[in-house]
Image (cartoon, rainbow, N blue to C red):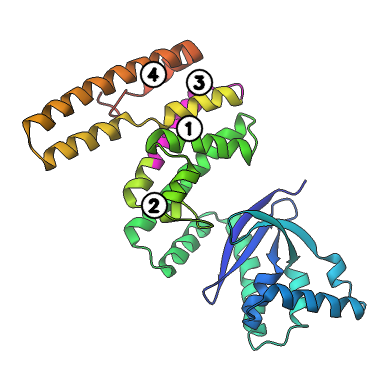
Amino acid sequence: MMKKENEIKLFEDKKVRTLWDVEQEKWYFSIVDVIAVLTDSLNPNNYWKVLKHRLTKEGSELVTNCNQLKMQSSDGKYYKTDVADTEQLFRLIQSIPSPKAEPFKLWLAQVASERLDEMQDPELSIDRSLEQYMKLGYSENWINQRLKSIEIRKELTDEWKKRGLKEGSQFATLTDIITKAWSDRTTKEYKMLKGLKKENLRDNMTNTELILNMLAEASTKDISEVVVPENFEESKKVAEQGGTLYSSLIFLTWGIFFKNLTLELFIITLLSMVMFYITAIFDEKECIVYFGDKYKEYMKRSKMFIPYIF
């Protein structure tokens, strides 16, 4: 079974959907995206339909050898899409009259070379992500947070894989639980709140949102490493616990108070602290019942609210 990694590549600021086949160590590119880049056609799908028909009549094996893989469309859903690997694209480009053909061939060769380099030196992947975010106009501070969030996310998904969880639906469910715990919204609801459709949610988070999400995912990973959940249901409980950020709620509540220093708000803040504490105590007791000594071991390593303090 082909193991794939979805990515978006940019050629002259135009997006080209790609898939990296881990087992075969090769790229697959969306043909209609390539046609859109090379021809500036308003209807690249129709252009490809006509081209396929012509190539078939000419007896070309290129159309027959092309694969169909699921890629994300503009509506955010995944559909089967005609794709070609690097070698097939070089041949396909010869059938498309375009002044961009030669620059695109150089770009293809560079993409293939970069991936091989990154497999030898993973730091190059980080450097290229940094460069790409800079081109898209993100601030340096935001980029640093985003790259850190990618690192933490990778550590979490690696932990999930160790527990035998399946990429796709199970990863998405756990991510929803974590997001719901710290933001009170599922990933889909969060995207709707921001008016997003196909865009990546994390690429549209503020610095604060990235930090909160990182804390939640890092906590989930740490808890999972200690309690070692044995099945999906136990991992869901870990995700719920890891996503609950009591310290963030405490700082947020006091921040609101210091912006509006009134007696009424001070009383509300104190009552909120009591409620947070009581809720956290009940959460810990519930986890102890659920995970037993494993969770007690985690409690010894991690403070309830503020790391190393309280």
Q: In which quarter of the view is residue 258 placed?
A: top left
Q: Which residue is mark 2?
A: 205
Left or right of residue 164: residue 154? left
> Cβ–Cβ below 8 Å for labels 4 and 3?
no
Q: Which residue is mark 3?
A: 227
The spot of residue 229 in percent (x, y) is: 56, 22
The relative height of residue 155 versus residue 52 in the rendered view (above or below) is above
Question: Mark 4 and 1 residues: CB-CB less than 8 Å, in contact?
Answer: no
Query: Which residues fall within the magenta stretch?
Result: 213-231
Gap in angstroms between the C-alphas marked 1 and 3: 10 Å
| Amino acid type shown at disc 3 | Val
Q: Looking at the picture, tell me which residue is in the foreground, 54 or 38.
A: 54
Badge 2: residue crowd in 10 Å (few <14, some 14–19, many ≥20)? some
Mark 2 / mark 4, whichever is N-terminal? 2
In 3D space, how far apart are the residues under numbered discs 3 and 2 (Cα atoms)? Answer: 30 Å
Residue bearing the label numbered 4:
283
Where disc 4 sits, the SS reads helix
Quadrant hosting residue 38: bottom right
